[in-house]
Image (cartoon, helix red, strand yellow):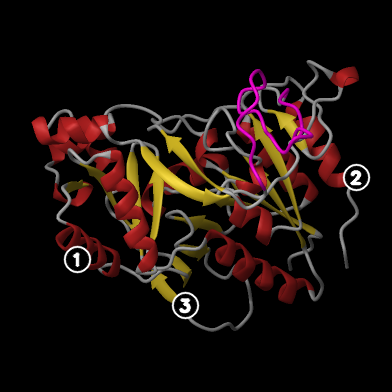
Amino acid sequence: MIRRTQTIYVTADPFFSRRGNVVHNFGELLERLAELEFPCVWLTSMTRFQIDEPRRRLGHGEPFIAESGSGVYLPEDYFHLKWGNTIRLGRYTVIPVAKPQPAAKDALDELVSDLDISIVTLRSLSHRELSQNTGLPANEAEQIRQRDFDELFFFAGATDIEIAGFAAEAKNRGLSLQSVGQFWSLSVGADLGKCIRELGGLYDRSLKYHAMRIGLVVPPTTGLANPPKSDPRLKPIYSACDRTLLLTERPLDAPAASPAGTVSSNGDEPAEEMESGEEIELTESPESGEPGKEIGEEADAGGQSAGSVETVSVEMVEYPRLRPDLAGRGSYIKDAFHLHAPDLWETVLASIVEHKPRK
């Protein structure tokens, strides 16, 4: 029987290297949470095939949410409950939030044809090209394109304006387009927030009271151009969880929203004045590598244009501010912590345990 009062939803990808090695002492966090009987749900862009080996190695037996919010994967007999729409994928019972393949493939083909834009899908690459573009051995690279819901691709020779137009049209059609490292993910209906709420509802039913949902988030980039709650990649987690803890690559020494309605993206020079709700453009670069540079000139151009320009509506939200008396110790007010602090997990767990859940 599940006897937990809090559930932890962690963005798992930053805790694994490209070759699957564990970083940031992630195993220590999992062990401590297991002792506390707090389930740790992994949020990942990876497939069930990619995540299988790390789960076995770390003894992770909890549900996970894969392919960027496409579905909730439940281990065999984890919940002894009846619920609605589910499908069986391998040894998992899955609550699909996005439409299963080939829905994403067909939607991407139609979108590309209508917009006359050049892309390269991972599905179309040879084994050698796939290995070269992912930097992984052939057997590991193959796991990346064995996808249940979304379709991975990169642009070949597209300009930033064309990519922005592609993103806008995808949104108009109700498609989910997300940047995943050096690639793009397109799905029909992926929604990370909905996945968290679906799984959270199962925990609540099993416990017969509300299991507090705590997000444990590493921002997608080392610097935050906008307050965390306004980042479109983090907003679903903030909205679905009762509380969210932010783990940053660098100490958050940027000031809170400045008096004149300005925010500083680097902590040094103030940005131009912005009103709440004003639209700005965010430019995102790929995390590593130049996709497609091994398969011809068109793909080379795709690597150069892998960044994207995205227009978002920004809500003015204060940054967590570093407490001067705790500088260098990785402890922050407003639920923010330095990812490289030596006492990171001790501090994070103390914050989780000391917070009283609702029953």
Please rate how many residues cluster around mark 3, counting C-alpha atoms within 10 Å: few if below 14, some from 14 to 19, many from 20.
some
Please state the extent of the stretch shown in magenta in the rendering: 253-275
Q: Which mark is residue 354?
A: 2
**Is residue 162 shown to the viewer in this render?**
yes
Q: Is the residue 54 above or below the residue 2 in the image?
A: above
Task: Report x, y in % for residue 40.
Answer: 65, 51
Side of 251 where 302 appears, left or right: left
Nearer the observer, 117 or 297: 117
Which residue appears at 84% of the width and 40% of the height? 351
Which residue appears at 91% of the width and 54% of the height? 356
Q: Which image quadrant is residue 129 in?
A: top left
Q: Dot 1 corresponds to which residue?
A: 110
Query: Quarter of the image containing the C terminus?
Result: bottom right
Q: Secondary structure at mark 1?
A: helix
Task: Report x, y in % for residue 82.
Answer: 60, 83
Query: Quarter of the image containing the N terminus?
Result: bottom right
Q: Nearer the viewer, mark 1 or mark 3?
A: 1
Q: Which mark is residue 263?
A: none
Side of 169 where 109 appears, left or right: left
Task: Report x, y in % for residue 144.
Answer: 31, 46
Sequence-wise, the earlier of marks 3 and 2 is: 3
Q: Dot 3 corresponds to which residue?
A: 86
Q: In whole angstroms, how far apart are the C-alphas of marks 1 and 3?
A: 27 Å
Q: Secondary structure at mark 3?
A: loop
Identified by mark 1, the residue type is Glu
Q: Nearer the viewer, mark 2 or mark 1?
A: 1
Identified by mark 2, the residue type is Glu
Nearer the observer, 199 or 231: 231
Sequence-wise, the earlier of marks 1 and 3 is: 3
